[in-house]
Amino acid sequence: MLNVDEIRKDFPILSREVNGKPLVYFDNAATAQTPKQVIDTIVDYYSNYNANIHRGVHTLSQEATDLYEQARYKIQAHFNAKFSHEIIYTSGTTHGINLVANGFSSLLKKGDDIIVSALEHHSNIVPWQMLCERTGANLKVIPMNAEGELVMAEYSNLLSKNTKLVFVNHISNALGTINPIEDIIAQAHNVGAAVLIDGAQSTPHVKPDVQKLDVDFYVASAHKMCGPTGVGMLYGKEEWLKKLPPYQGGGEMIAEVTFEKTTYADLPHKFEAGTPNIAGGIAFGAAIDYMNGIGFNNIADFENELLEYATNKLLDIEGLKIYGTSKHKTAVISFNLEGIHPYDVGTILDKLGIAVRTGHHCAQPIMDYYKIPGTVRASFAFYNTKAEIDTLVAGVKKAKIMLS
Amino acid sequence: MTIEEIQNEIIDEFSMFEDWEERYQYMIDLGKDLPLIDDQYKTDSNIIKGCQSKVWVHAEMDNDKIVFTADSDAIITKGIIAILIRSFSNQHPKDIINAETDFIDQIGLKEHLSPTRANGLVSMVKQLKMYAIAYQTQLS
């Protein structure tokens, strides 16, 4: 069992005020807060090790390289990848998705199918639309039901020998639904298709084992896992990463260059052109250490308790509707008050020091499904408390009175 | 009244409120009370897209003055629209072009006109001024 009072002391931002009220931070699905252990790692790096990596013979460069590569081993261990060169540093989830989409442009032909889900972040649908435009492949969509779950029977129907790639998020950002990715991966493999899983929303809550999942690609962002922004990771099976062409040209990613021909560097450097976010990568490692120190089982137990508590309390408010009611969901509650625009609710909550997300959460297709302009989304982390949920519930009640 | 006089009047009204709740409640009530735009003008071409709340603006000339009507699907946004329309509507185009919006800051609603706020209001103010520039060109 985790001790939330002790944990909160690790997060300096949690003791600040907003609009004269103690901050209640319930926008964790957008970005998680940063513990001092991670902040200290960044300060320590720039204070003691700052240098460019992989090339220098001088001590600083070698120490910085060691730290950066040690962090890659931490990420490898965390996701249980077979090799450390299967972990590619990226600038975040979106970068990882684009890297894979770009790589597939040379592998796809007219008549091939790509399958995505109706629960995707809409900015993540764009790379696949662009890919289909470039290659003549078709984009197919796994529909969702009223609970916010994927309709798996439809998925099975969409799969065929033409399916080359399936892209699904592990957990929906707008609704919190945990998708049955084991089944999705197994069915895709049966028809010979590769699978890319977006782990942006899952990695703060669960510890994915990429070998056990047998997933081909898995992407995540450090900032959702208590790390810094601007860094993330792409896991790819070695055979796939060897098959895909490099994404960007530049330093670091080449072995030999003449004007006639360039030989690309080995994995992972083939996909890591230019000077990377070195401090970010090292701090990503520190964030993984921090979260494992608390323990993902403890995190899941604690967050499920918060979710259940908040769901019951919020549903007591008359006219409040929760979107995304799957039994398999993480600590995300998307809701609306009847007849009231989510933007108005969010504005009043902000005045009360409560940070929630309002709007369509970049998941316009989901909002269209429910025929709503958006929702208010409260997303919880292991450093939130039941007392904060009480503050949220009181705030929603107040907003309802003011806005009705 | 000139735009400045109207804005000073609004500042006076808001100075009576003691805290944010009273200010917001007043704004919400303004938003509720005003049917701001004729439904025939709530078209896609009159829509200003913020990321979150939608704003519609319509302008027409009444002699040498511009009459603005507008609406939004969010009530707080609508309240601020009511305040902006009160200050800018029925005014000469050149006065609208030269008008400031500092009074929003002075009545404690600054955050709603911040360019980072995804409510469409910043674009709305820009749009009001664009209409004024267009009509001013016609007049001269």
Image: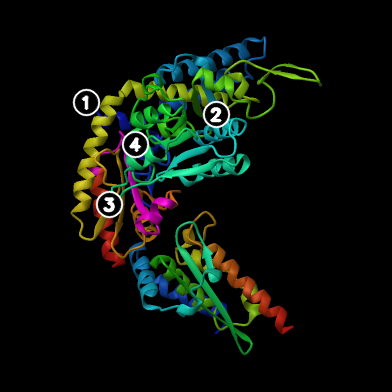
Q: Secondary structure at mark 4?
A: loop
- Mark 1–mark 3 Cα distance, whole angstroms, equals 28 Å
Determine if marks 1 and 3 fall on one subunit: yes
User: For this view, does A189 lie left or right of residue A399?
Assistant: right
Determine if marks 1 and 2 fall on one subunit: yes
Q: Amino acid at mark 3?
A: Ile
**Residue that badge 1 annotates:** A1
Q: Amino acid at mark 2?
A: Thr
Which region of the structure is painted magenta? A365-387
**Residue that badge 2 annotates:** A90
- Mark 1–mark 4 Cα distance, whole angstroms, equals 26 Å
**Residue that badge 3 annotates:** A322
Q: Nearer the viewer, mark 2 or mark 4?
A: 4
Residue A34 visible in the picture: no
**Residue that badge 4 annotates:** A179
Residue A191 x/y as whole percent: 43, 29
Check residue A367 for magenta coloring.
yes
Residue A261 x/y as whole percent: 77, 20
Q: Nearer the viewer, mark 1 or mark 4?
A: 4
Residue, x 64% and y 87% (percent of image)?
A: B64
User: For this view, does B100 lie left or right of residue A234?
Assistant: right
Q: Amino acid at mark 1?
A: Met
Residue B61 visible in the picture: yes
